Amino acid sequence: MFEKYKSHFQSSIPRIPEAKYAHIVVLRETDSYAVFKTDGELNVARVRSGLKAPTTVISRLVLFKRKQTTPERLTGRELLRRYGIHDSIKAQYKSMKDKDLGDCAYNENPCGGCPDCVIYGYAIGDSGSEKSKIFIDSAYAIPAYEESHGTFTLNAPYEDGTMTRGTDTTNRFSEQDHVLPEVPFPSVVTLRDPSPNSFLYVLNNLYRTKRYGAQTTRTGQVRNKIVAVIFADGEIFSNLRLTQKLHDLLGDACLPYAPDVLKSKTEEAISSLIREDGVLYELVIGEPLAALQNEAEAILSDETAFKAWLNALSQETLTYAEASKVIKKK
């Protein structure tokens, strides 16, 4: 798997960092009215508009880091349950404290050996901890706040579909700010010391996750478009810096951005910024990126190959957890 980039991968997940990084550059673009909020209002930050105008400050919508990783983790965990990975671990292993493993539960009871626990990490009470191998930061919308949000009035009708009962009109109205459709949030998802299996796991979660933020049963659809993969021996530019560079390159363009223009400008921004980062790297973009994604999709779209890969990944993370003295065979 991914033989062309073999030198950038570990043969298995190492216990000690070895300076191999796979950076996946993603354009997260809203496909519906999304709600990214923490305390009742949309998350907003005051930052510089671009790199060329250091004194021009604007407000930008923010997609916080956990609002990105949590939906992706839950997507992966759904698949682990569907294909019996958690049940298999529970049946075969116990903790080093000679306790049987309970059901692996996100933010409650980590098993310590499944792909989610090992790759994304955990730190919960006396259950121990595992440092995440995924590095991610808050993502910022390219356009200003004023261009990228709208306020809408919401209502709750009665059974007959109207807002009135007899001669009385309900007062069940409220207002809520929403992120507009087709607002892009550039984001860099970094996997440290990737093996081919762990890299594909992160890639699969990005492909499959479609809803982010609050009210995901009603709205919040987001499309993750992978624009580049960068293999490097260190960390690279931030989400904010990428957003500011794109703001400069897009100039006076208004929402919605033309897809081909946004893609080409993102590739241009990546190529420019990576040269300033002081790392040794291989940039996978354009046709080589399409070939890499086709190789990934050949596995992810075939059920037999998918199950074989998921079992191989599970065995890899269990071996890591055993070596880390987190779990042991019953």
Image (cartoon, rainbow, N blue to C red):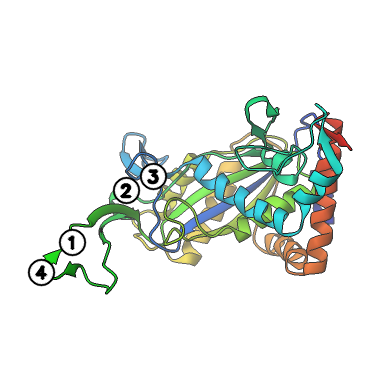
The answer for how far apart the CA atoms under marks 2 and 3 are is 14 Å
Name the residue rendered at 73%, 64% in the picture.
300
**Which residue type carries mark 1?**
Thr
Q: Mark 1 near mark 2, Cβ–Cβ under 8 Å? A: no
Task: Say what secondary structure mark 2 lies in.
Answer: helix
Residue in the picture at 69% in, 43% down: 104
State if disc 1 and disc 3 touch (CB < 8 Å): no
Which tag is nearer the camera, tag 2 or tag 3? 3
The residue labelled by disc 3 is 37
Q: Distance between the residues labelled 4 and 2?
A: 41 Å
Mark number, residue 170: 1
Mark 3 residue type:
Lys
Asked if marks 2 and 3 touch (Cβ < 8 Å), the reply is: no
> Dot 2: few (<14), some (14–19), or many (≥20) neighbours within 10 Å?
many
Q: Nearer the viewer, mark 4 or mark 1?
A: 4
- Separation (CA) of disc 1 from disc 2: 32 Å
Q: Mark 2 points at which residue?
A: 145
Q: Earlier in the sequence, mark 1 or mark 2?
A: 2
The reply, left or right, for residue 154 in relation to residue 85 is left
